[in-house]
Image (cartoon, rainbow, N blue to C red):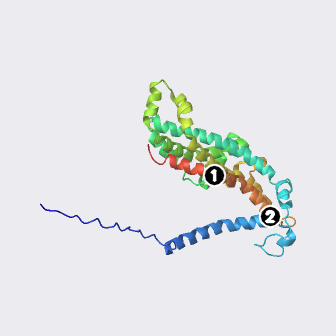
Amino acid sequence: MSTSSTAPPAAAIPVRSKRPPRVTPARIGVYAFLLTGAAFFLLPLYVMLVTSVKPMAEIRLGNLFALPNAWTIEPWIAAWSQACTGLDCSGIQVGFWNSVKIVLPSTVISIFFGALNGYALSFWRARGANLLFGVLMIGAFVPYQVVMFPLVRAFAAAGIFSSLAGIVLIHTIFGMPVMTLLFRNYYASVPGELFKAARIDGGGFFRIFFQLMLPMATPIIIVAVIMQVTAIWNDFILGLVFAGRDNLPMTVQLNNVINTTTGERLYNVNMAATVLTSLVPLAIYLISGRWFVRGIAAGAVKG
């Protein structure tokens, strides 16, 4: 009779993984780059904000980065309702409301037709659709200055040059290629079975678009709204050429306020007017920035 003895198992030795060092040259370089980029964009904004709440007596002292000793909102009030553009001293509020009248219809019309074009090019592919899409995309890369003079002549012949309808139409035309591209790529990620099922149920072109495709496109619609509102609000050259004297947008009014040479140059009023002009795009990005990222990512992968 034999006996066998088994040795007790050796105690398990815990293996500790080495954590990467918290401070590395690569991490230092990344943070240095990010801080430099943030300072590059935030420092001018800080100077504008600080200058806009200083009285002119402090600005003349030359302390550009110093906080004001006596805070005041008078420059903001003057920029909004009293700043002069030539002989007109109504402030930039006139340009603000002009920009609102330009942005709202231009954004809605360009997004609607861009969504309609993208839907047609994705699911109702007619003969020559790819050729038409390529021709449309050329418009996204043609500089404004190349087609400026022909468009001025065409709009003048049509009787809509220097009018609100003319500036709305020009923004709609220039926004169409990018909007079509956005919605075409988004609809390409929608499963084709949904469209086929809607067709089997008797849905026509516009019924499928309004009841199925358009409600599904909410993320990309938000992206399109952000892009169009920002682009149209910040536009200068098209508003200067096509809007006319009675419909000049806020950017043109700002240029006229800053470049007015009569009287004393009020730097605090100029800075306040600049910040007021940029408030709408800044507010849009701060409020809906996360929706912008989600909308862009929604059409990135075909499902």
At 56% from the left and 51% from the top, the residue drawn is: 293
Provide residue 120's location: percent of width, then percent of height: 50, 36
Q: Quick one: quadrant of the C terminus?
A: top left
User: Image check: 131 left or right of 113?
Assistant: left
Residue found farthest to the left: 1
Residue found farthest to the front: 1
At 53% from the left and 32% from the top, the residue drawn is: 212
Provide residue 252's location: percent of width, then percent of height: 74, 55
Residue 210 picture quarter: top right
The crowding category of the residue bearing disc 2, from other C-alpha atoms within 10 Å (few below 14, some 14 to 19, many at least 20), is many
User: Image check: 171 left or right of 69?
Assistant: left
Q: In the image, which is nearer the foreground, mark 1 or mark 2?
A: 2
Residue type, numbered disc 1: Met
85 or 74: nearer the viewer = 74
Determine the secondary structure under disc 2. helix
Residue 83 visible? The answer is: no
Residue 182 visible? The answer is: yes
The residue pinned by badge 2 equals: 52
For residue 10, above or below residue 159: below
Determine the secondary structure under disc 1. helix
For residue 130, above or below residue 41: above
Residue type, numbered disc 2: Ser
The crowding category of the residue bearing disc 1, from other C-alpha atoms within 10 Å (few below 14, some 14 to 19, many at least 20), is some
What number is the disc on residue 148? 1
Q: CA distance from mark 1 to mark 2?
A: 36 Å
At 69% from the left and 51% from the top, the residue drawn is: 233
Residue 282 picture quarter: bottom right
